[in-house]
Image (cartoon, rainbow, N blue to C red):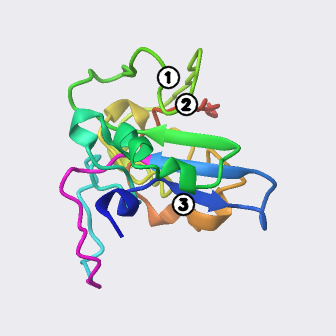
Amino acid sequence: MTANEAAAAILADTADTAAAREALYKDLHRHPELSMEDHRTSDVAHSCGHDVHVTAPPGEEVGAGARDMVDAGIVDKLPKPDLAFAQHVMGTIPGGAIGTRRGPVLTTASSIEITVHGADAFRTPYCYWGLGGLADMDSAPGNHSPTFAPDIQPTPDRGAQAIVVAACAWLAAD
């Protein structure tokens, strides 16, 4: 397995639990654990944004991982999702702001609508996205996707901090 293959986007076939196929795409730190050796941790994480425990693209710091994966033919080997979610936390963007780039981002999009309600992300029990870093995201809802959640979101009390800035909309409860 190449590093690009090891860092490819996760696709979840939810045919048994729902009709849609969803892609989950998260950026990680540029120094991933690629030894593929079994190991144990203390089950404690700082969760500052780079502690996202999911497979992701290389080149995260320079914003080139997705292009590298496309050029390597990884995308052609994966089933096409019906719905895709993507995100990355960047310390260079001011709190409360969302960064994007001109042209297609992961897929063609003409607009992005995001609604976020909350405060202090460092105390929110939130096991789906599993990362933190922006203090104004505390009471954001945890289950953005009922079709995908049964596979990877077993219980909200597992906890981790949260932020979702992606090609998705959030409808938050007051």
Per the image, the residue denoted by label 2 is 107
- The magenta stretch spans residue 57: no
- Which mark sits nearer the N-terminus, 3 or 1? 1
Residue 49 percent across, percent down from the top left? 29, 46
Q: Count residues near mark 2 (Cα–Cα under 10 Å), then give few for <14, some for 14-19, many for 20+.
A: few
Q: Report whether residue 87 is seen.
A: yes
- Judged from this view, the residue extending furthest toward the right is 19
Cβ atoms under marks 1 and 2 closer than 8 Å: yes
Closest to the observer, 126 or 81 = 81
Nearer the N terminus, badge 2 or badge 3? 2
Q: Position of residue 161 (x, y in %)?
A: 38, 49
For disc 3, the neighbor class at 10 Å (few under 14, some 14 to 19, many from 20) is some
Residue that badge 1 annotates: 104
For this orientation, the residue located farthest to the left is: 31
Label 2, secondary structure: give it: loop
Relative vertical location of residue 86 with respect to residue 16 in this rendering, above or below: above
Residue 11's x, y, as percent?
57, 57
Looking at the image, residue 113 lies above or below residue 3: above
Tell me which residue sits at (59%, 68%) in the image: 154
Image quarter of residue 84: top right
Residue at the spot of label 3: 156
Identity of the residue drawn at 76% across and 51% down: 20
